[in-house]
Image: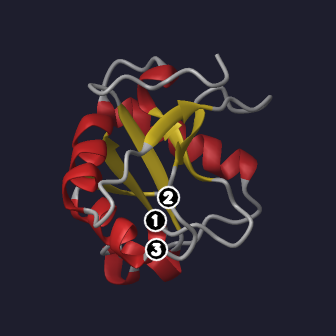
Amino acid sequence: MKGDVIPDPDHVARHCKTTTAPDGEIQATAFMLREGEQSLSVNWLEELRCSDRTSEVRALQDLYTRKMTRVGAGARIAILNVRILRTKVASESSDRRLLRVLHDPEPDDSSHSGIYEIPYDDDLVAELIAQVVLENHPARA
């Protein structure tokens, strides 16, 4: 339901454009808000209700193909654990920032969610998030 807190044991995935993942390596720029954004767009993996990670990645690839005009050949999917993400930023950011990861479903995407409390143009928080990427997968099949 919209606004529900995503539990710490769960996982979210971030679509990373080709420009933020040169040579398949996801950079901190993939986790920076664009001007005017309130949250970093992610997908809640457990909400996809798939049986395994391979199925989750395939579901995300299909979702991206439906929602986006173009999924770049070098685009990637970054998988993050909510607890690790929140703990890393809270313990290592200068202001002990407490990120909120909230469910924000869309009509065509029930898994859509957001990471909130990321300041616009904050290099440090983006770098801390990049450091806790658990998995890196192609964004298109």
Helix, strand or loop status at disc 2: loop
Residue occupying image coordinates x 53% and y 76%? 121
Question: Tags 3 and 2 in contact by the CB under 8 Å rule?
Answer: yes
Q: Earlier in the sequence, mark 3 or mark 1?
A: 1
What type is the residue that disc 1 sits on?
A: Phe
| Image vertical order of residue 112 relative to residue 40, above or below | above
Of the two numbered discs 2 and 1 in the rendering, the one whose residue sits closer to the viewer: 2
Cα distance, mark 3 to mark 1?
9 Å
Where residue 52 appears, x then y in whole percent? 31, 25
- Seen from the viewer's position, the closer of residues 94 and 104 is 94
Where residue 26 appears, x then y in whole percent? 34, 71
Residue occupying image coordinates x 44% and y 26%? 6
Q: Colour scheme in the image?
A: secondary structure
Label 3, on which residue? 122
User: Number of marks in the image?
Assistant: 3
| Image vertical order of residue 122 relative to residue 46, above or below | below
Label 1 environment density (alpha carbons within 10 Å; few <14, some 14–19, many ≥20): many
Label 1, on which residue? 31
Cα distance, mark 3 to mark 2?
7 Å
Residue 82, quarter of the rendered image: top left
Label 2, on which residue? 118
Where residue 62 appears, x then y in whole percent? 60, 42
Image-based side of 83 in relation to 68, left or right? left
